[in-house]
Image (tube, rainbow, N blue to C red):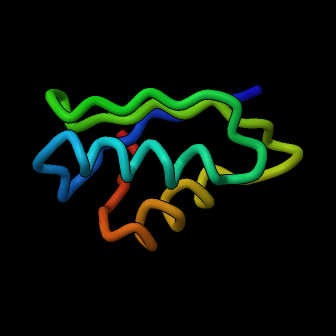
Amino acid sequence: MLEARFLVEGMSCAHCEAAVTKALQAVRGVSRTQVSLETRRAEVRFDPAQTTVAAPARAVGDAGYTLREA
């Protein structure tokens, strides 16, 4: 398992935080997520045999937010 940390752009409320969390959890190979509206950060634990570090960024982008590697 690998961990990646991201900056999340576009979150402004608890609903946004929940939407980003849901998008990250839907990515195949992601086993753990932690999203913070307060710090505008997300931590993702994933299996590199099942996904890449770019997949969470695409999923969050599809949800209307921007994920950048921290």
Query: Above or below — where is 38 with respect to 29?
Result: above
On the picture, is 15 further left or further right than 54?
left
Residue 20 percent coordinates (x, y): 39, 50
On the picture, is 14 further left or further right than 51?
left
Q: Is residue 64 visible?
A: yes
Count of marks, rendered view? 0
What quarter of the picture does the C terminus occupy?
top left
Residue drawn at x 20%, y 40% as measured from the top left:
14
Q: Nearer the viewer, residue 37 or 52?
A: 37
Query: Above or below — where is 58 with respect to 1?
Result: below
What quarter of the picture does the N terminus occupy?
top right
Residue drawn at x 77%, y 44% as measured from the top left:
29
Residue drawn at x 79%, y 37% as measured from the top left:
47
Q: Nearer the viewer, residue 41 or 63?
A: 63
Q: Nearer the viewer, residue 22 or 58?
A: 22
Q: Is residue 3 visible?
A: no
Residue 55 percent coordinates (x, y): 62, 60
On the picture, is 68 further left or further right than 31?
left
